[in-house]
Image (cartoon, rainbow, N blue to C red):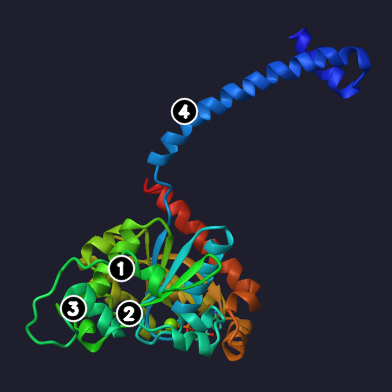
């Protein structure tokens, strides 16, 4: 003990005499470092390979125009800026997630929705979309699709799935089989954060995919219509085995709006509110990412993200 204290003092003083002593300490310290290193290499690193670090899989749904894309883009941006790899999936037939990332129309026009890629669907499922009565593979290969057909910028890979008319009716056709399999792959089998920007019809999720989701969010705005949609989504979600539907109230203009939404929740869980902000509208007009023009939006979505993470940890998924 006293020796150690002396050693520390010598380091600080760096006097010539005691330096020899200090070197001795450093050497002993060095051997300790070697021991710790070998402990890390032999035990901790192999152990880490078996520990799957939990990454969030989030679905965002709701009525058209409520702010699903605004919320999805901002969540993706927040995870990406923390260093996570993110797959942002635009699964809304009214696809506009690319624009919310500020991608130019020329870039966007180069991304083809997966549901429209007949050759790919035929190659993977063994049947061409629209071919009547065909037999097709139910377990097509999809693991290369995010890299091959997604658009990568920074830590984000944007994938536009699109949705054919047939697929929206929940048919058992090649394109819907491929899309369902692809969603399941991204949610259940990969270790990127996944943010799904979806329309309110969620029939294309399978039970396996929905059970792999950490958070199932419905965005609402003050008004009966989007809240009615939230309840319809909850009914569909229940059938898919989703136990809890989380609500984000967007475009609120004050306490009265929040109170109004709270009164209409009927069993849905409110996880955050985002104020109406002219800067978000402005971003849409300027074709800029809303998270770059609205610090208020970023702050609100960050609070929601924090809530989701605490929530998942509390459920013991992390
Ligand atoms: N908090 C907000 N404040 C003001 N305008 C918003 C807000 N959130 C979204 N908007 C605007 O509402 C419109 C629809 O948003 P969007 O995210 O595209 O909705 P969705 O994807 O649900 O159709 C856009 O013009 C967007 O700029
Ligand atoms: Mg949208």
In-image side of 154 versus 72 (left or right) = right
Number of numbered discs visible in the structure rendering: 4
- The mark nearer the N terminus, 2 or 4, is 4
10 Å neighbourhood of mark 3: few (<14), some, or many (≥20)?
many
**Residue of label 1:** 183
Identify residue for label 4. 42
Q: Name the residue under label 2.
A: 114
Say which label, 2 or 3, has the lower sequence index: 2
Q: In the rendered structure, which disc, 2 or 1, sits on the residue that comes first in sequence?
A: 2
**Residue at horizontal 34%, vertical 85%?**
93
Which is in the foreground here, disc 1 or disc 4?
Answer: 4
Locate residue 237: give its quadrant: bottom left
Q: Mark 3 points at which residue?
A: 174
> As rendered, which of 211 and 6 lies closer to the eye?
6
Q: How far apart are marks 2 and 1 (CA)?
A: 12 Å
Secondary element at image label 1:
helix
Q: What element carries label 4?
A: helix
Q: Tell me the distance, in whole angstroms, between the alpha carbons under discs 2 and 4.
A: 44 Å
> Residue 111, how many percent across, how many down?
43, 83
Q: In this view, does 15 lie above or below 287?
A: above
Residue 125 seen from this side? yes
**Cα gap from disc 2 to disc 3, whole angstroms:** 12 Å
Q: Quadrant of ligand 2?
A: bottom left
Q: Of the two numbered discs 4 and 3 on the same chain, state the one appearing first in sequence.
A: 4
- Asked if the residue at tag 3 contacts the one at tag 2, i.e. Cβ–Cβ closer than 8 Å, the answer is no
CB under 8 Å between discs 1 and 4: no
Q: Furthest-top residue in view?
A: 2
Residue 294: give x, y in percent of width and height.
Answer: 63, 76
Work out how far the residue at label 3 is from the one at label 1, CA to CA, in angstroms: 14 Å
Give coordinates of residue 302: x percent, y percent.
56, 63
| Spatial CA span between label 4 and label 3 | 48 Å
């Amino acid at each position: 003990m006293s020796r150690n204290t002396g050693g520390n003092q010598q380091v600080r003083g760096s006097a010539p005499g005691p330096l020899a002593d200090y070197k001795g300490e450093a050497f002993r310290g060095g051997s300790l470092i070697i021991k710790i290193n070998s402990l890390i290499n032999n035990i901790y690193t192999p152990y880490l390979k078996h520990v799957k670090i939990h990454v969030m899989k989030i679905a965002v749904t709701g009525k058209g125009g409520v702010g699903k894309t605004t919320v999805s883009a901002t969540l993706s941006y927040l995870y990406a800026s923390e260093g996570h790899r993110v797959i942002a999936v635009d699964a809304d037939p009214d696809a506009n997630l690319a624009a919310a990332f500020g991608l130019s129309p020329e870039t966007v026009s180069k991304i083809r929705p997966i549901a429209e890629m007949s050759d790919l669907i035929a190659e993977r499922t063994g049947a061409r979309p629209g071919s009547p009565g065909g037999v097709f593979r139910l377990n097509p290969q999809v693991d290369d699709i995010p890299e091959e057909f997604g658009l990568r910028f920074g830590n984000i890979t944007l994938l536009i799935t699109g949705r054919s008319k047939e697929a929206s009716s929940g048919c058992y056709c090649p394109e819907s089989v491929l899309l369902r399999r692809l969603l399941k792959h991204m949610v259940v089998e990969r270790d990127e954060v996944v943010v799904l920007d979806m329309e309110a019809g969620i029939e294309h999720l399978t039970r396996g995919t929905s059970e792999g989701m950490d958070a199932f969010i419905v965005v609402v705005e003050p008004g009966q219509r989007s809240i009615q949609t939230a309840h319809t989504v909850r009914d569909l979600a229940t059938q898919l085995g989703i136990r809890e539907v989380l609500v984000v109230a967007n475009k609120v203009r004050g306490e009265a709006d929040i109170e109004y939404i709270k009164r209409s929740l009927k069993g849905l869980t409110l996880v955050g509110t985002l104020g109406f902000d002219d800067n978000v509208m402005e971003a849409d007009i300027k074709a800029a990412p809303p998270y770059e023009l609205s610090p208020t939006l970023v702050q609100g979505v960050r609070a929601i993200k924090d809530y989701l993470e605490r929530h998942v940890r509390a459920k013991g998924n992390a």
